[in-house]
């Protein structure tokens, strides 16, 4: 037996220098560790990806996402820092309220995505001028160099490699936070940013995540991460969840993953992320790639991201060609696998806009043979964010 | 007697019939199996060539024929219940039965003790 395709096969565990502060706990829990973005990360625990996925949708899953990049821009006041960041991303940050988070993309001059990221404005007016950033693990060095080279003299980039990041996701996440003493977490709206004391530890919390479920991302000093992890896992609603289920959850949730749906050639319009470009920015521009993005919004992009439901049971993996039923190539699969909640194969990919309407019948070329599929509305599983 | 390959297939030969599957170690490495693509009966498969494809949540893997033969039967139960590969990989989770020539050389395959020693080196 030989693994034919795996996102992880390009890296080797033996040469990996990076581990998260929770590495020993993953190993003790029996996780299978795999290389991911230069880190040894748990792809699954003994329960397995399907059980972990379903647990997260039904209860609360705990993820170690400490490999992600935590950073901040620090300037003299909100308007100055927001303007510096708005020169790099298409989101409206000037009007981001206190205690709010926004999803956006770092853009190339051609409007492609250098990375996607979260931008946070803390709840405390005393922190005015500081904007938190969370970026993808595999893009940290690229992002930080890109940002640092483009900041005005009065705004600087700080990075926080000494902080860990946990994600607690699922319908029981709120109750877990309250049981562990963070009563204020219950009142947070989706994409709110706050602070809390959780299991006796001072943490920074956002009500967000990347599973399509309600939940929280919890930033904590690395030295406290183990104690917090243990306290969360001691709650009967919580089980540890690996990157395998994180991927199947976000795929069912219709969420883009950098390096799959997003790269430096893909614009936010093509990726279906126009919702993340607020009206003021769509009209006023002032960010890299504005000409392309404005034209794509007005005239339509050359390709668009769609959901795909293959007929039958065979998954269609990343790189699978998408054709019309009579064999004309119209696109490519960017993420594909099995959706445990749907109990069926699911995929996302890019197609010519004429073939993007939900219900459109297409074919996926799997091992040389056409596999019937149809375009499906995203997300595959309805998001259950706290509105 | 069950024999194993370095690629973690197993084979059990009974006269001129050989049953093929993947080992307990292989299923644990794959994780949850969600789909198995099986060959058509009557297909001739050369030694070391693809006999089936097994797909976990994360990846697709080829299953190679440890010896040459002609597909006589496939495990249709895997179509509806691919998880059988996880539950009983070296029993109910078999993949294909090949019709093989009498006296096929299996000298390059490992017996269970040798395979277990091989796994220790991984």
Image: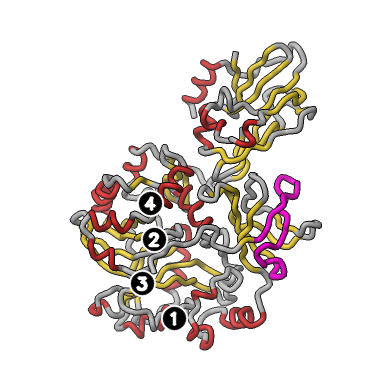
Q: Mark 2 — residue?
A: A214
Q: Residue A68: horizontal and vertical position, in percent?
A: 40, 58
Q: Mark 1 — residue?
A: A92
Residue A122 appears anywhere in the view: yes
Which of the chains bears the disc numbered 3? Answer: A
Cα distance between the residues tagged 3 and 2: 18 Å
The answer to which quarter of the image holds residue A73 is bottom left
Could you tell which of marks 4 and 2 lies nearer the N-terminus? 4
Which of the chains bears the disc numbered 2? Answer: A
* Position of residue B33 in the picture relative to residue A201 (left or right): right
A303 vs A17, nearest the viewer: A303
* Position of residue A45 in the picture relative to residue B91 (left or right): left
B14 vs A32, nearest the viewer: B14
**Residue found 26% across the figure and 77% down from its top:** A127
Cα distance between the residues tagged 4 and 3: 20 Å
In this rendering, the label closer to the viewer, 1 or 2: 2
**Residue found 47% across the figure and 58% down from its top:** A138
Cα distance between the residues tagged 1 and 4: 29 Å
Residue A154 magenta-highlighted: no
The C terminus of chain A lies in quadrant: bottom left
Could you tell which of marks 3 and 1 lies nearer the N-terminus? 1
């Amino acid at each position: 037996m030989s693994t034919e395709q795996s996102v992880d096969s390009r890296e080797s565990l033996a040469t990996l220098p990076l581990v998260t502060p929770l590495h020993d706990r993953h190993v003790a829990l029996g996780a299978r560790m795999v290389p991911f973005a230069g880190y040894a990360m748990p792809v699954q625990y003994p329960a397995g990806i399907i059980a972990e996925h379903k647990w997260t949708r039904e209860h609360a899953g705990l993820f170690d996402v400490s490999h992600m990049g935590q950073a901040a821009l620090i300037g003299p006041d909100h308007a100055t820092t927001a303007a510096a960041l708005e020169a790099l991303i298409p989101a409206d940050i000037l009007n981001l309220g206190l205690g709010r988070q926004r999803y956006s993309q770092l853009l190339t001059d051609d409007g492609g995505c250098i990375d996607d990221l979260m931008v946070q404005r803390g709840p405390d007016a005393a922190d005015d001028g500081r904007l938190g950033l969370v970026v993808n693990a595999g893009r940290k060095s690229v992002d930080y160099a890109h940002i640092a080279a483009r900041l005005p003299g009065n705004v600087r980039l700080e990075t926080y490699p000494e902080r860990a990041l946990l994600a607690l996701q699922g319908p029981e996440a709120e109750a877990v936070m309250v049981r562990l003493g963070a009563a204020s977490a219950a009142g947070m709206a989706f994409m709110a940013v706050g602070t809390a004391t959780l299991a006796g530890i001072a943490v920074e919390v956002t009500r967000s995540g990347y599973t399509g479920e309600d939940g929280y991302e919890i930033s904590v000093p690395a030295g406290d991460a183990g104690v917090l992890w243990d306290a969360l896992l001691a709650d009967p609603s919580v089980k540890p969840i690996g990157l395998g289920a994180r991927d199947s959850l976000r795929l069912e949730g219709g969420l883009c993953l950098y390096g799959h749906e997003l790269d430096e050639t893909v614009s936010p319009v093509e990726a279906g992320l126009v919702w993340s470009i607020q009206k003021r920015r769509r009209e006023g521009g002032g960010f890299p790639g504005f000409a392309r993005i404005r034209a794509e919004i007005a005239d339509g992009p050359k390709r668009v991201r769609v959901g795909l439901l293959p007929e039958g049971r065979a998954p269609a993996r990343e790189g699978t060609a998408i054709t019309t039923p009579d064999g004309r190539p119209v696109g490519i699969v960017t993420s594909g696998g099995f959706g445990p909640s749907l109990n069926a194969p699911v995929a996302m990919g890019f197609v010519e806009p004429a073939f993007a309407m939900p219900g459109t019948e297409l074919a996926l070329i799997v091992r040389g043979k056409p596999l019937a599929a149809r375009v499906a509305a995203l997300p595959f599983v309805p998001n259950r964010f706290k509105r | 007697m069950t024999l194993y390959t370095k690629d973690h297939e197993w084979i059990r030969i009974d006269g001129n019939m050989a049953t093929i599957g993947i080992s307990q170690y292989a299923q644990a490495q794959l994780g949850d199996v969600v789909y198995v693509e099986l060959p058509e009966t009557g297909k001739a498969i050369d030694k070391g060539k693809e006999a089936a494809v097994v797909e976990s949540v994360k990846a697709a893997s080829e299953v190679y024929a440890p010896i040459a033969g002609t597909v006589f039967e496939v495990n249709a139960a895997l179509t509806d219940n691919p998880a059988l590969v996880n539950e009983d990989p070296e029993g109910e989770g078999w993949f294909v039965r090949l019709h093989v020539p009498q006296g096929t050389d299996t000298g390059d395959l490992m017996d269970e003790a040798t395979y277990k020693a091989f796994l220790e080196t991984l």
